[in-house]
């Protein structure tokens, strides 16, 4: 097919493959911490950073990344302040992010169409700088997860035991939130801020249905993610569909098939 010869499509597939690898890695830990909605929160804060980047004439993804990192620190701080109602931190930061993004939209009427592309994804416009940023974040996530896999497993399955064993709980919590912020901020150009949390959660939801161990959950989540991201991008490219929406709908279709398959095997 001619579309596979196009450089923009090759860059889209490469960027999608990198995000398809890193997003479920972070998603597993978010789901285990019952913080699945943090993806939407950081995505909306990133959009505010992207809008400011366009307003200042600075690389928008970098500003969005900075905003997401600052939001991740704020979330962890608020989670400590509201220990009994930790989910309040997510609602507060999301509200602030949406409000700030809306305000910045009113200042930059000339670039609003560019910002809106980050809401729905613009994977076909990835350039070399975008790919290098995505690749850098992917390498960082892989290094951290692989070198701290056992500690993170203990932390999210039994935080009390992890604390007794001497693990720096606060440091690990901040680290995971920061890595999630990085992944989300570089993902919004690929699948869009409105859909990015799907890459964090739906592959994990699929893997939890069929996996029998934590390690299998992580591996299967990555496999489900990669198959759906690449399959969705190829289908979108061949039939001229919306890339981000195609990827997410394929993920949901796989989730439904997995649920039906497990239900059929039980009968």
Image: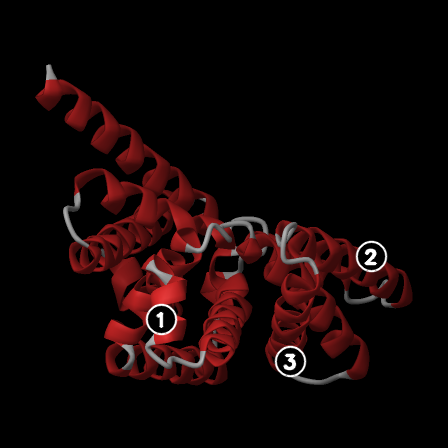
Residue located beneath label 2 in the image: 99
Quote the CA–CA distance across marks 2 and 3.
17 Å
Residue 119 vs residue 87, the one in the foreground: 87
- Is tag 3's residue or tag 1's residue first in the polypeptide sequence? 3
Where is the N terminus found, in terms of image quarters? bottom left
Q: Please state if 45 lies on the left or on the right of 150 as rendered.
A: right
Residue 43 vs residue 96, the one in the foreground: 96
Q: Please determine whether, in this image, residue 263 is positioned above or below residue 76.
A: above
| Mark 3: secondary structure | helix
Where does the image place residue 208, in percent across and percent down from the top left?
26, 44
The image's mark for residue 152 is none
Quarter of the image for residue 109 reads bottom right
Quote the CA–CA distance across marks 3 and 1.
30 Å
| Mark 1: secondary structure | helix
Q: Residue at x 58, y 49 (%)?
A: 194
Quote the CA–CA distance across marks 1 and 2.
38 Å
Count of picture labels: 3
- Is tag 2's residue or tag 3's residue first in the polypeptide sequence? 3
Where does the image place residue 240, in percent across and percent down from the top left?
41, 45
Q: Residue furthest top?
A: 267
Q: Nearer the viewer, mark 1 or mark 2?
A: 1
Quarter of the image for residue 121 reads bottom right
- Is tag 1's residue or tag 2's residue first in the polypeptide sequence? 2
| Mark 2: secondary structure | helix
Q: Residue at x 10, y 14 (%)?
A: 267
Q: Does the rendering let one see residue 62?
A: yes
Residue located beneath label 1 in the image: 162
Q: Please state if 260 lies on the left or on the right of 51 as rendered.
A: left
Where does the image place residue 97, in percent across and percent down from the top left?
74, 61
Label 1, residues with CA under 10 Å away: few <14, some 14-19, many ≥20: some
The image's mark for residue 66 is 3
């Amino acid at each position: 097919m001619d579309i596979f010869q196009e450089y923009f499509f090759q860059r889209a597939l490469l960027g999608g493959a990198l995000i398809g690898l890193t997003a479920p890695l972070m998603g597993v830990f978010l789901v285990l911490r019952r913080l699945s909605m943090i993806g939407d929160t950081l995505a909306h804060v990133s959009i505010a950073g992207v809008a400011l980047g366009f307003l200042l004439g600075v690389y928008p993804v970098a500003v969005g990344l900075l905003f997401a990192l600052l939001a991740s620190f704020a979330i962890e701080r608020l989670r400590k302040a509201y220990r009994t109602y930790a989910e309040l931190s997510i609602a507060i930061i999301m509200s602030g992010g949406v409000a700030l993004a809306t305000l910045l939209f009113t200042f930059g009427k000339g670039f609003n169409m560019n910002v809106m592309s980050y809401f729905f994804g613009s994977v076909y416009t990835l350039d070399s700088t975008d790919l290098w940023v995505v690749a850098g974040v992917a390498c960082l996530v892989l290094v951290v997860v692989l070198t701290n896999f056992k500690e993170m497993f203990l932390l999210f399955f039994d935080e009390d035991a992890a604390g007794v064993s001497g693990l720096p709980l606060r440091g690990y919590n901040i680290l995971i939130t920061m890595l999630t912020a990085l992944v989300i901020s570089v993902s919004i150009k690929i699948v869009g801020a409105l859909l990015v949390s799907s890459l964090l959660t739906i592959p994990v939801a699929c893997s939890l249905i069929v996996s029998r161990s934590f390690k299998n959950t992580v591996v299967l989540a990555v496999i489900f993610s990669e198959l759906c991201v690449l399959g969705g991008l190829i289908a979108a490219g061949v039939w001229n569909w919306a890339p981000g929406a195609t990827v997410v709908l394929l993920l949901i279709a796989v989730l439904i098939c997995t649920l039906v398959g497990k239900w059929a095997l039980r009968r």
